[in-house]
Image (spheres, rainbow, N blue to C red):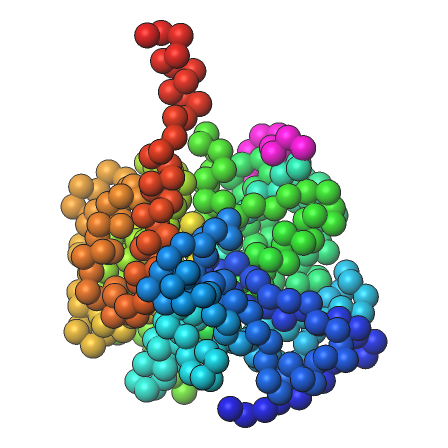
Amino acid sequence: MTEVNFPLPEGTHTVILGVGDLNGLMRGKRIPADQWPRICGSGNALAMSLFTMDMTCDVWETPVVGFANGFPDCHIFPMHPPVAVPWEPGVAMCFARAEGMDHGPLTVDPRQALLRQVERANAMGIDLQVGTELEFYLLDPDTGRPRDKGNDCYGLARAAELEPVLGPMRRELAEMGIPIEQSNPEYAAGQVEVNIRYDSAMIAADRVVMFRSLVKQLAARHGLNATFMAKPFIDESGNGFHLHYSLWSEGKNIFADAGKLNDLGRHFLGGMQQRMAEASICGAATVNAYRRRQPLSFCPVNASWGLDNRTVALRVIEGSDSAVRIEKRDAGADCNPYLLMAADIAAGLDGIEGKTEPTAITTGNAYEDDNAPPIPLDLADAISLARNSGWLRDVLGADQHEIWLQQAERELAFFNQQVTPFETARYLGTF
């Protein structure tokens, strides 16, 4: 282990050190500045259960962490110099990596799954570049509903109304090392989309974890709740997470040939399409996540692909050579970015190695394309496909695969063990 001593911004009294948990939520500790040199040298101990607990912080018996072994510790270590938090004078934040007490990698750290695919690509001479788009709602904390009314997608008047919140978000997140390309009102009242500039895959994933945490903090400062929940309102647009993939080598986009997707890019596309159904659990792991997958919703319901077509799952974007890329559109904004990217990239690299061809292109409305390969439209089907996928088990690692599916199975069981308000309203006074 190489010891580092990252300098603190002048005037720092507290450092936030955090890491992405099982669900890609940022968790960690606040550390007095006088303890920082020790943390740089020996790390900070946290319960390893942060990688095996659900989004509500509930724990259960898992193959790696549980009551049988007493919920042991792991350590997290800073990866870069802390950056000042603009809205908290004297506070700086640093993203961390995790390791076991033996200084080895943790099999339940989701970051490890993506790291393996990044290293695989690097061994092939490939630099993976990923741009991310995340949608979220800004809600009144008392009502749980948007304060604005009506759909004003891309509306500049609505953007001006939201600017007191989104303006500081763009500027202050950029100050913290998250380069925001743009923001806009999305397809429902209270809904926003923010685009983060593309970068190497691991940096892109780390930024998503930080972004979601910081957006919630910034929204709260303006008296709002921010939610990345996939489908907060059944009659309104869901929150998607769109990823833009391109592969680079020696400074060139190797997906591109005269501004068009080339054979290598097409094989990467074919690989992603081939594994999309069995890897669905990586982008949609809750009952609610599958409520996004509705016809005519701009969320895909099959593994179709097409050119600049927002009804498909895999949207090919062409233009200048540097702009050629594949946009994958099925995931919810609340998913774990490490597991999602790991599965996408593994499938794409497999496609390159196996020269996998995609199915026929969809040129019209993908919701009406009966020939497009199906993807799961509910959690039970997604769990079944993932449980039976040796490929996904190899990509995530046996421990990560098992714990991720255990969580999904628990979520499905919790949902099935309740009587919904719909049932009560419809049947209680009828029968």
Per the rendered image, the range of residues in magenta is: 142-154
Residue 168, can we see it? yes
Q: Position of residue 25 (x, y in %)?
A: 52, 58
Residue 188 figure quarter: top right
Q: Is residue 153 above or below residue 305?
A: above
Chief secondary structure of the magenta span?
Answer: loop
Q: Is residue 152 above or below residue 202?
A: above
Q: Is residue 251 above or below residue 237?
A: below
Residue at x 66% of width, y 37% of height: 141
Residue at x 40% of width, y 54% of height: 60
Quadrant where the C terminus sits is top left
Residue 169 figure quarter: bottom right
Q: Position of residue 299 (x, y in %)?
A: 37, 44
Residue 318, can we see it? no
Q: Position of residue 409 (x, y in %)?
A: 32, 48
Residue 137 figure quarter: top right
Which residue is situated farthest in the top direction here?
430
Which residue is situated farthest in the bottom direction here?
2
Residue at x 74% of width, y 49% of height: 221
> Is residue 150 one of those drawn in magenta?
yes
Residue at x 19% of width, y 65% of height: 390
> Is residue 196 one of those drawn in magenta?
no
Q: Nearer the viewer, residue 203 or 97?
A: 97
